[in-house]
Image: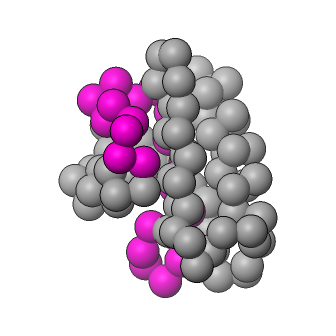
Amino acid sequence: MPARVRVTRPPLPLAPALRAAAVRLCPDAPQEALTAAALAVAGGSVIGAALAWAGGEALGVESAWRGRGIEDALQETLEAARQSP
């Protein structure tokens, strides 16, 4: 994963700016029903999102950032978020 990319577990519900980025990256995810989220940020912009809700999950990464290990980092962080109380 590139050094300038950070993966974070934001609190739910997502803040408006983060929600807008999540909708852009994972348009089919039910934003109001999220149970866990992980976001990848580079240069102050959200470039990847992994979202979970009861019965499903979605992963989206901007095309220019795909294949650099970000997907794996998002999945790992999302799984950790789902297991946290």
Q: Is residue 19 left or right of residue 75?
A: left
Q: Magenta residues?
A: 26-46
Residue 64 lies in quadrant: bottom right
- Work out whether residue 61 or residue 39 is closer to the camera in this orientation and state it: 61
For the C terminus, give its image quadrant.
top right
Q: Decide whether residue 42 is among the magenta residues.
A: yes
Q: What residue is rendered at 56% in x and 47% in y?
A: 59
For the N terminus, give its image quadrant.
bottom right
Residue at the extreme left of the image, as rendered: 16
Q: Establish if 68 lies above or below 57.
A: below
Image x and y of residue 65, in percent: 62, 74
Does residue 18 appear in the picture of this structure?
no
Q: Is residue 74 left or right of residue 69?
A: left
- Work out whether residue 85 or residue 79 is closer to the camera in this orientation and state it: 79
Render colour scheme: one colour
Q: Decide whether residue 38 is among the magenta residues.
A: yes
Does residue 60 appear in the picture of this structure?
yes
Image x and y of residue 73, in percent: 73, 55
Image x and y of residue 14, in percent: 32, 45
Residue 78 lies in quadrant: top right
Q: What residue is rendered at 53% in x and 54% in y?
A: 60
Q: Establish if 8 lies above or below 64.
A: above
Residue 81 lies in quadrant: top right
